[in-house]
Amino acid sequence: MNTPVPYQEELEKEFRAAYLISQFIQEIISEEEEEELDLWMQQSEHHMQIFEDLTDESMTRDFMKWYAERNTERSLQEVKQRLQFTRPSKVIPLWRYAAAACVVLLLGAGIYYFGLRDKGSTVTSSGTETADILPGKASATLTLADGKKIDLTYLRDTIINNEVSIVNGMVVYNSTTSEPEMHEISIPRKGFYELVLPDGSKAWVNSSSSIRYPSRFTGNERRVMVTGETYFEVAKDADHPFIVSVNGVDITALGTAFNINAYPNEGGLRITLTEGKINVNASQRNEQLQPGQQITIRPGEWDIRTVDISPVVAWTKNQFKLKNTTIEEVMRMAERWYDAKIVYKDKVTDHFTGTIDRNVPISQLLKLLEATGQVHFQIEGDSIIVTH
């Protein structure tokens, strides 16, 4: 019987992280590997510090100089051969190859970064507290027909009245024979909320958004009104189409799922279909979307294209998922989710790709962006200073 290697599982994870970092350094990392590396960095501040240290050019050169002084050139060459990196077509600075080898050398030298530093043996600290901004959370206000406002933020299991209950922190409507009345749920900055509408449809409502709907659907349609961003999973009812009204546009569905982004500063109304079919109607024009299609509506312009759905709906899974995303778009999301003010000192034209949980402080998101070396940030109170 094979004797298990002590800490084998931990070592395998450490070497996997080293492999991902070396792929990143050489700029040959795949999209799936980059997402895996992003998630690994989010697991702890220590992981983020490891990444920053091992991708720092000056640190790499210092380490290689130290290593060379110990007459280990032959060992270095052996490590380089074992790495068996594929040279990409474009020219990459030599230090990146040295850095990739450096990652493995550090592991060979007692797993210094991945082991000892986790135990605090040689961690350096400035002793100062870093400014940061905490993320948002489930938060909403329910406004009843009589104007009464109910803060839903801390309610878990509560009966509001004979129609409305809070079950496990989510609004749920009960079947009643009472006359329907209009309700509205509004979400502040740093908030989001999920609810089940009276017909059983589900709605996820993002920061700085609202949804207005009847406490019971009657007549031949189910109509709601929204602002900001909302994702719907519509309950099937062929006899009563589900209609969302937003900015003078009607989106009609039977049983389907779609995302609406109607923030005023996003350059147009964007509707993205994830499953089923929807009809989009406004100004005597009607378009039908297929799954994976997105329509952007601006004055006098309707643009339909096929898109990657996952970044569009990532917020419903409490994630930021960036794919070739501009810094302005990233910062608009951060502005709403962290209630931050964005100040641009320089123009940043680069695009960003990566995935990070939304439940982390803003510093974690900014470090992920800074890892590209193309942008830098400074946190001052509730403001984020953006520089090149």
Image (spheres, rainbow, N blue to C red):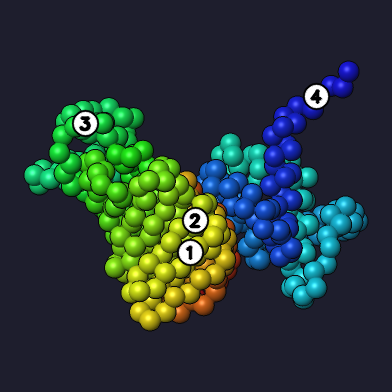
Residue holding disc 4: 4
Residue that appears at 36% across and 51% down: 242
Secondary element at image label 4: loop
Q: Earlier in the sequence, mark 2 or mark 1?
A: 2
Mark 3 or 4: the one toward you: 3
Task: Give how far apart the Cα atoms at labels 4 and 1 are.
Answer: 59 Å
Mark 4 or 1: the one toward you: 1
Contact, mark 2 vs mark 1 (Cβ under 8 Å): yes
Contact, mark 4 vs mark 1 (Cβ under 8 Å): no
Q: Is residue 357 left or right of residue 5?
A: left
Mark 2 or 4: the one toward you: 2
Mark 3 burial class by Cα count in 10 Å: few <14, some 14-19, many 20+: few
- The three-letter code of the residue at mark 3 reads Thr
Q: Earlier in the sequence, mark 3 or mark 1?
A: 3
Residue holding disc 2: 277
Residue that appears at 74% across and 73% down: 93
> Residue 259 at x, y = what percent?
43, 56
Secondary element at image label 2: loop
Label annotation for residue 96 = none
Residue holding disc 3: 176
Q: Is residue 163 left or right of residue 237?
A: left
Q: Earlier in the sequence, mark 3 or mark 2?
A: 3
- The three-letter code of the residue at mark 1 reads Gln
Q: Evaluate whether residue 7 shows in this view.
A: yes
